[in-house]
Image (tube, grey):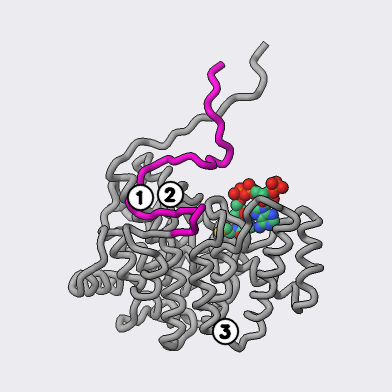
Amino acid sequence: MTTHTLAIGLDGIAVAETDLSLVDGQNGLLVYRGHWARDLAIHHTFEEVAHLLWYGHLPSAQELAELQDKMRANRELPAHVKGILDLIPADVDMMSVLRTGVSALAAPDHAWPPSLDQVISLTAKMPTIVAHRFARLAGREPLNPRQDLNHTANYLYMLKGQEPSPAHVRALDAYLILTQEHGMNASTFSGRVVASTQSDLISSITAAIGALKGPLHGGAPSEVTEMIEAIGTKENAEPWLRAKLENGERLMGFGHRVYKTIDPRATALRVVASQLSADDPWFDLATHVEQVGLKLLDEYKPGRKLHTNVEFFAAAVMRAVGLDDFLFTPTFAVSRVVGWSAHVLEQASNNRIIRPQSNYIGSMPE
Ligand SMILES: CC(C)(COP(=O)(O)OP(=O)(O)OC[C@H]1O[C@@H](n2cnc3c(N)ncnc32)[C@H](O)[C@@H]1OP(=O)(O)O)[C@@H](O)C(=O)NCCC(=O)NCCS
């Protein structure tokens, strides 16, 4: 019987060449198309970095204005999508609602290969889906998107019902930029597998959302805040974390398949969060939990190189700008759709169906 090289979890296997990002896990580096992601997060906006990933370069003033206009013009949801969202029972989680809302955006013209206009339209609508649901759960009428606000400010406006402060917009923009793209992670791979069959953009992104939902991928930040709440006090940090590790459980917000040093996104977001939360006892406790967690992981898992990952400080930033826990992973999806769609376009430009093998270890017929 033929057996194939086995790579459980596809660890260390490259499945594509990409121009989009370099994730250097040994040295803790993240590059988007020749630019340091941390510099993009400090000096640029969501739309500018999306332009970089989609079109290959940072936009001129005119290109930026055109992209912003297109995104603003595409924020409204079709009536049937709102109707479908309103039919979903209130206890269904936000990621499932987002996945369903995106799926409902399928249209006859969503053909292969996807166009940049489809990508822009989808990216513009995802925050509106999240905000629509959020408003309904809060018992209020969803707000119409504001045409005078940029992508991030409009998202915060639709969620909170008031214009956000520039500091909050800047902080959330930094988070959304740092999470737009990250190589061949599980959700991006899922989206690319679907794209490789020449399916449509919406199907790819729906698959990616499903993958992101899992706690081992994008589902961790709300578990980070739950962990901090459960720990409650600095004195309780060590016994609580030790008990988890004794029990064989994982500490949320630590460890990464690729980063064997500090996740550069965590470094950048720690700075962003500390600027907003200097006097916040929650943040003080969180940084204490981080230090104790790192110490104990070194003790219980020596040599595994477990460091703080993006989710730990993503939770801190989103909490600081006033987002509820259950919005954390959907907000991650609102940013990552940029990378997912850039990968779908890249896959489409040089496609071969992704079709790995499995090794049969069952019995043969008598
Ligand atoms: C991210 C993650 C899924 C990567 O998984 P992976 O690359 O498959 O790592 P492995 O499962 O091979 O882990 C290697 C070892 O470190 C341990 N480990 C990894 N992450 C750990 C964590 N957060 N807490 C405790 N132990 C952890 C594993 O138990 C394993 O131990 P072992 O060698 O004794 O079996 C994993 O680190 C994790 O579950 N982290 C917590 C969830 C999280 O924060 N996710 C967000 C990622 S951005």
Q: CA distance from mark 3 to mark 2?
A: 35 Å
Asked if residue 189 is positioned above or below residue 146 in the image, the reply reads above
Question: Foreground residue, 257 or 90?
Answer: 257
Residue interval drawn in magenta? 1-29
Q: Is residue 42 left or right of residue 243?
A: left
State the SS at label 3. Answer: helix
Q: Which mark is residue 53?
A: none
Res. 215 visible in picture = no
Asked if residue 147 is positioned above or below residue 64 in the image, the reply reads below
Quadrant in which residue 299 is drawn: bottom right
Tag 2: Cα neighbours inside 10 Å, few (<14), some, or many (≥20)? many
Q: Is residue 299 left or right of residue 214?
A: right
Question: Foreground residue, 80 or 175?
Answer: 175
**Residue highlighted by disc 2:** 191
Please say whether residue 30 is one of the residues in the magenta stretch: no
Where residue 34 appears, x then y in whole percent?
Answer: 32, 59
Question: Foreground residue, 74 or 68?
Answer: 68
Q: CA distance from mark 2 to mark 1?
A: 7 Å
**Residue highlighted by disc 1:** 344
State the SS at label 2. Answer: helix
Q: Is residue 31 left or right of residue 54?
A: right
Labels 2 & 1 near each other (Cβ < 8 A): yes
State the SS at label 1. Answer: helix
**Residue highlighted by disc 3:** 277
Q: Is the stretch drawn in magenta largely helix, strand or loop?
A: loop
Residue name at image x 46 percent, y 78 percent: 171
Residue name at image x 44 percent, y 51 percent: 188
Quadrant in which residue 280 is drawn: bottom right
Question: Foreground residue, 220 or 255?
Answer: 255
Q: Amino acid at mark 3?
A: Ser
